[in-house]
Amino acid sequence: MFARFSVVSRGLSLAALFACGQAVALEFPLPPAGEDVIGQVQTITAKYEDTFADIGTAYDLGYLELIAANPGVDPWLPKPGTEIVLPTRFVLPPGPREGIVINLAEYRMYYYPKGQNVVRTYPIGIGREGWGSPVAVTKVTGKIANPTWTPPASIKAEHAADGDPLPNVVPAGPDNPLGPFKFTLGLPGYLIHGSNKQFGIGMRTSHGCFRMYNNNVLELSKLVPVGTPVRIMNEPYKFGVSAGKVYLEAHTPLDAEGDPSNENKHTTVINALLKREDLAEHLQMNWDVVRDVITAEDGLPVEIAGPGSALGSGASPAPR
């Protein structure tokens, strides 16, 4: 199932892409019941002066997910002619497909509009080291256009210590770090908002809030009503089914504070798999492939089991 924008021809520059208005949100039809995979991986050919920041803005992808999907490629100056993988295939997060779902480990939000058989997905920035974004279930409590920002005492102290004192109130406008719109949540001190620094989208850059590209937060402002449920999770390993085959999508795990985790990754994967009782019929996983996916952590869904799959002789029951 493809996003509602077409795959851009390989000869089209990013400047032309922006000019012709093809930089739009990723929207997919929901898969049938019992299936979890949406979208298709795409590739483009890098032009001179393309950067991952530009590509991310054009294709609604975050900076770190582009780096993960393109190991060894210089994110600031890819060589002209380099094939750039666009990780636009996703395993939907586990749990109910309703409201807003945020997965911290993949720096991504999913929105399921009520009464529509579609899902929209957006890259987000999350809390940086020491300011981790929470795992919680909450809801949207307010919507404010052109917000002002009143920095809390902790952030004012941090900026003052760095020789960059903040005013008591930052007015709306291009210098406001909340961007053109904010959603308040039922979690005091946490927001979904735009940004005056687009580079931080898809990274750990905030003080715990969820940052979006400004065009995305403005789009979302027209779609999401107050009262919409918001579920925030931290799931680095997502399992999904498509056409009878099982897929694994792996991201670098984060600990409870939003920092890289040193937890045994294989144990975490097994625990995540055991939560999926519907996958019991697919016990013949190829654990060699699973290990490769865990090692790569490239965010691309990879087939690990299924009828007629070409997974080789490594298929075996789950390790005990």
Image: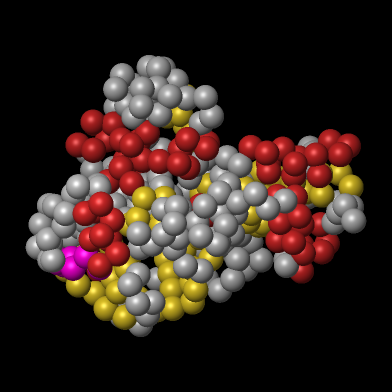
Q: Is residue 137 above or below residue 251?
A: below
User: Chief secondary structure of the magenta span?
Assistant: loop
Tell me if residue 122 is in the magenta stretch: no
Depth check: give the residue in front, 96 or 270: 270
Q: Does 192 sit left or right of 121 as displayed?
A: left
Residue located at (75% from left, 41% from top): 291
Question: If the image is split into quadrants, where does the C terminus sit?
Answer: bottom right
Q: Magenta region: which residues?
A: 146-152
Asked whether residue 26 appears in the rendered view, the answer is no
How many marks overall?
A: 0
Residue located at (47% from left, 35% from top): 67
Q: Does 209 sit left or right of 65 as displayed?
A: left
Name the spot of residue 301 as percent of width and height, x first. 61, 46
Residue located at (16% from left, 57% from top): 166
Residue located at (20% from left, 47% from top): 163
Q: Is residue 81 above or below residue 59?
A: above
Asked whether residue 267 appears in the rendered view, the answer is yes
